[in-house]
Image (tube, helix red, strand yellow):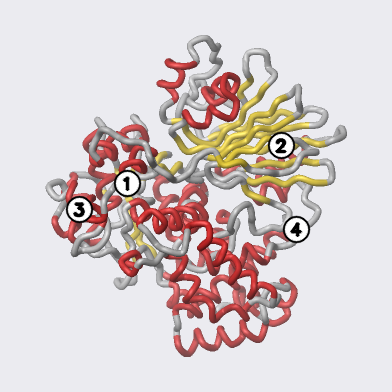
Amino acid sequence: MCSINFIATRINHDLETPIKKMSQVSLSRGPDEQSTICKKNWALAFNRLSIVGRKKGSQPIYNEDKSLVLICNGEIFNYKEIKKRFLSDHVFTTTSDTEVILHLYEKYKEKCLSFFEGQFAFIIYDLKREKVFAARDKFGILPLFIHKGNGVLVISSSIFSIIASGMVKNKELNESAIADIFFFYGPRGTKTILKDVFQIPPASYIYISIDSIFKPIRYWNFSGNKEETISLKEAIFSSVNKRIDKKEFGVYVSGGIDSAIVALAACKVSSIKPQLFSISFFDKEFDESKYQRMIADKLGCELKQVVITNSKIINNFKKSIIFLESPISRLAPIPLILLSRAVRREGIKVVLCGEGADELFLGYPIFEKNQSSYEAKWAENLRYLTLFKNRSIQQFVKGEKKLIDQQFGSVNSFSSLRNKEIITKLSSYLLASQGDRVSMANSVEQRFPYLDEQVWNLATSLKNSDIFDNEGGKAILRKEFIDDLPLQIIKRKKQGYLAPDTQVLIEILKKKEFTNLLRKEAIELTNMFNPKRVEEIIENVKKNHDKQDVSALILVLSTQMIFRIIEKL
């Protein structure tokens, strides 16, 4: 993992200061090694978290005639196979997995993307044509943002790095993207929290120059029609084996079946025992310590539980928003940042998790009602349309819901539920606010064994009886692993990961540093929310502790924070 930063300008420009500022902002993503290249009208910077090719894996990487240069964030898990089968005639200058991207692109251009098994976001700059080829992995595990205009092109792993370049003249927040976060989990399509910064969507690539338009092209869909010859259990074990670090790695265990399976698989395929990491809440309503310990004891692994108190969440709120680069509507990401901090303190750089299983195998209880998560969230939050000052947002939110329904069809089949979940909740929320951003805040690479194309193909070929039984979704996971894990873990009802939002927010409302951000004058300065509606919600939270009110107020407070952070960049 790392951060990648790129600038190109139409006319000669001193780019040394802008590219160094970009690199400094995203330093946590790659603290092991930094490199920059500055030319007359283009520059790039690379911050490295060294994992594969530790001694000889530096970037940027040039091709043989130095007409192309690559910077990549992420991992290509099948790079050895690619190198052997397709690139025996190429000269490699590193032992890094990412160099195969460069040489495979030389042979196949954008078709190279179909060969890669991994999690990645990369930029290839063609020095002769002055054109960029950039792409993200299939599930959108890793981010890639872009700004262009006024004779400049800026691409980065980080929104705040792009702002720090000084090349973005309009730093206005994107109201529709903030509404997306509240009503649909995350910004839709190419939107980000800034009007003049965009994201390359998952499973998409771009060809772009300073003067061309930004037009992402999708290279993979969710049909999952490829037949697999192995069992789901074998596929999960194989996926875990691809993603472990042979020297040292950790596994996040929540106390549920998904992460327990990943931990089990890691123990089976690795010659070393992984260290297990978990969140333990001081508030017993949210704590799953009992089940985490049960998994660790069964597997004979060391377990490090990070105890989270309300005060820890409060004390890390502002710093967490800086790493998340986004407003939030629940506090769950903050404990995860503290968890990745504990992983890093143990000297571990790679950690596996169970994210993605609920989406692939329909594990959320809402699926039993033939609804997706975003449909439930949209319905719950409709009463907050007047929270937004701009009345056009009300029509926008309703229109956005229709667009998603049209994209997947009005009837919810298993495949449409799965696809809706992947596109809305997984890629724009879970893999962002609870994935890459929270782990890389502390220079830890999080890997996702369920988000493997072979596992995906098997999941999409399942019958109704494989998915649902009397105990809910994920029936096949319970069946496949019933002899390997404690029965209490196998039979456990789904408990979603939650933080004590209400209790924390009540305490936050007693602290001046936060309440100042919610004053009428502060709300009006941001020009996003209706001050009177915010005041009503604050009073309702104090009196009634309504969960939706709490979620709305967290969104307002974190948006206020983002506004001020951006002002100072």
| Mark 3–mark 1 distance (CA, rounded to whole Å) | 14 Å
Lower position in the chain sequence, tag 1 or tag 4 = 4
Looking at the image, is mark 1 or mark 2 nearer the viewer?
Answer: 1
Residue type at tag 4: Lys
Q: Name the residue rendered at 23%, 50% in the picture.
A: 477
Which residue has dot 3 on it?
478
Residue 140 appears at what percent x and percent y? 51, 46
Which residue has dot 1 on it?
459
Q: Name the residue rendered at 51%, 87% in the picture.
A: 540
| Mark 1–mark 2 distance (CA, rounded to whole Å) | 35 Å
Looking at the image, is mark 1 or mark 4 nearer the viewer?
Answer: 1
Q: Which mark is residue 208?
A: 2
Q: Are marks 2 and 3 in contact (CB under 8 Å)?
A: no
Which residue has dot 4 on it?
171
Residue 237 appears at what percent x and percent y? 27, 37
| Mark 2–mark 3 distance (CA, rounded to whole Å) | 46 Å
